[in-house]
Amino acid sequence: MSTKWDNKIKKVAEDVYQLDKEGAMNVPVKIFASEKLLKKIKSDDSIQQGMNMSCMPGIQKQSVMMSDSHQGYGFPVGGVAAFDTEDGCISPGGIGFDINCGVRLLATNLERKDVDKKIKELINALFENVPSGVGSESKLRLSDEDYEEVLNTGLNWCLKNNYATKEDVERCEENGHMRTADASKISPRAKKRGRRQLGTLGAGNHFLEIQYVDKIFDEKVAKIFGLREDQIVLMIHTGSRGLGHQTCGEYLRKIEDEFSDIVDKLPEKDLAYAPTGSKLAKDYLGAMSAAANYAWCNRQLITHFSRNAFKKVFGNDVKLDLVYDVAHNIAKIEEYEIDGKLKKVYVHRKGATRSFGPGHKEIPKVYRKVGQPILIPGSMGTSSWILVGTDKAMNETFSSTPHGAGRLMSRHEANKKFDSEKVIESLKENKVYIKAASKRGITEEAPGAYKDVDEVVEVADRVGIGKKVARSIPMGVVKG
Amino acid sequence: MKYKYLKHTADAKFMAFGSDIEEVFANSALAMSNILGETTKVKGVKEHKIKLKARNHERLLFDFLEELVFLLDTENFFLHKVKKIKISKTFVLEAVVVGDNSKNYDLKSDIKAVTYSDMKIEKTKKGYEATVVVDI
């Protein structure tokens, strides 16, 4: 099928495509995808949204689209853009509603054979211990002071209250604490929405998954990450719940009110941005960072509850060591060489994972020699991947790599096409046991509704913006 | 037809119809809620009063839908129907919504947010139509 993009997009290298600057664009768009994935990307509005990113003020070098890109609101999901910290902007829609939606991976001291016969028992224990689904409520009753501390200090609060170990804090992006956080910039309404959701999985595409490592691609790096074949690992995918969603929405409206002259000229209202240097840009940075801290505490509390569930089934000797925790919806201040000079920029990653290469000072010491771990979850019931960050990503993609499979069809289409009983049946045939808070939600997350995660990872590996370390296969899923 | 769903890769997009502005608001609330569950099967045993003021119809619809998301997240309130709704010329909305505890039903997803993208309210020959995208 030919599209309006065919003549505009040119291949500049293997798996790399470019759309040159035109009209109001300040920089070109670079798409990192195979021919097959590019075809999918062309089929919705994501490339137009990529061009819109390129029109934003103070954007540096190029806007980037990953191979798992699809249409979002404002920026495409899978979009990365870096803006001048003095003469640029911060855009809530360039980060996403689920601020610090992310993934963490825990490595156990169990083997596949230890879990094979107990998978149902284990998944049921996890389901009991970790609240999931719509309306799931936190087991915690926090005082106002504690809640503020969660928002301002992130994992430090968890460490202080024995929900995290020192190693957990060390092995988390930003050590689970954005220092730019300012809880006072989060509205009472957003705080109320998130209050009883802290330590809950949520619904939609969020999940807990028991997996086994089925293949190692880089023995040396896998060993440093603490991974080996047939090992049982736990993957957690969730974000900042209603607190983050509310915060993003409110700031979009605040920006619309204060900068109506800017917003009126935008092709989409969700591209709304606050110019750097404005009070609103500073406020949003404080609020977004606090929401990011909330998300890290959320994943940490779920880790704590999961450890308890594992102990119930396997006794007190079972270990779940954090490998790493990555954010894939976030904006950060990072430094890059642009036009021969080192420059601080606001990197927006909306459905993209950071990929710092060897030696970067922000990588935990244990991994610093080889690069940061990158965690790419598959769709429900398909494989997930562990990659390692590279120097090439620093030059090509503002140290970013894909974040997952990426949706292929709308939820509505998926509902029409798939049947929940059949999806459960086919998961069973593949020896994946699923426990879901909502049966209705299963069809929307059917593996067929997503792109092929293996292909997404192959592209990242071939281009060199993330190198394959290990692949894991699911045995059981808890779905919200 | 009260509403219909439109194609959107990641999110849920719908168009709601009404002979007057009140009806298009009420049908938008139904369209959004039916993404999660079946409102016709929900009992009307709980009641909430909503009062909002905004500067135009789009913003008022956004606030109205967002209030329903807020009630679901904070009070487990899930909609059966909009019992009463009145919108003044100065964009003041007063509504009574009825529904039940969400935990009594199989709801498939959270609504993260009502988004601004593609949000429109237009006057047609037959009345009004609203287009809304929600992030789920």
Image (tube, coloured by chain):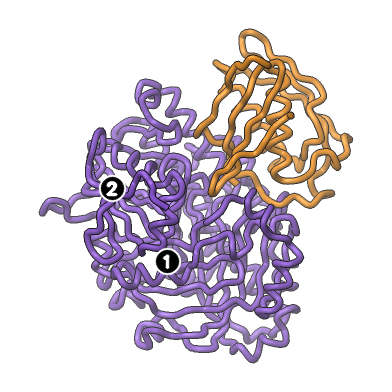
Chain colours: A purple, B orange
From the image, tell me which residue sits under label 2. Answer: A7
Query: Would residue A336 appear left or right of A426 to someone viewing this image?
Result: left
Foreground residue among A471 and A291: A471
Query: Would residue A86 appear left or right of A170 to someone viewing this image?
Result: left
Q: Is B78 situated above or below A311?
A: above
Q: Amino acid at mark 1?
A: Val
Which chain is disc 1 placed on? A
Q: Is B131 situated above or below B54?
A: below
Q: Which corner quadrant holds the C terminus of chain A?
A: bottom right
Please give the name of the residue rendered at 10% of the width and 54% of the height, measured from the top-left corner: A340
Residue B44, by quadrant, is: top right
Outermost bottom residue: A113
> Where residue A318 sits in the image (x, y, percent)?
62, 84
Please give the name of the residue rendered at 66% of the width and 75% of the height, measured from the top-left corner: A476
Please give the name of the residue rendered at 76% of the width and 19% of the height, measured from the top-left corner: B85
Q: Secondary structure at mark 1?
A: helix
Of callouts 1 and 2, which one flags the residue occurring earlier in the amino acid sequence? 2
Q: Is residue A37 visible?
A: yes
Query: Would residue A469 appear left or right of A28 to someone viewing this image?
Result: right
Q: Amino acid at mark 2?
A: Asn
Q: Secondary structure at mark 2?
A: loop
Q: Residues within 10 Å of mark 1 (few under 14, many from 20)?
A: many
From the image, tell me which residue sits under label 1. Answer: A456
Marks 1/2 same chain? yes
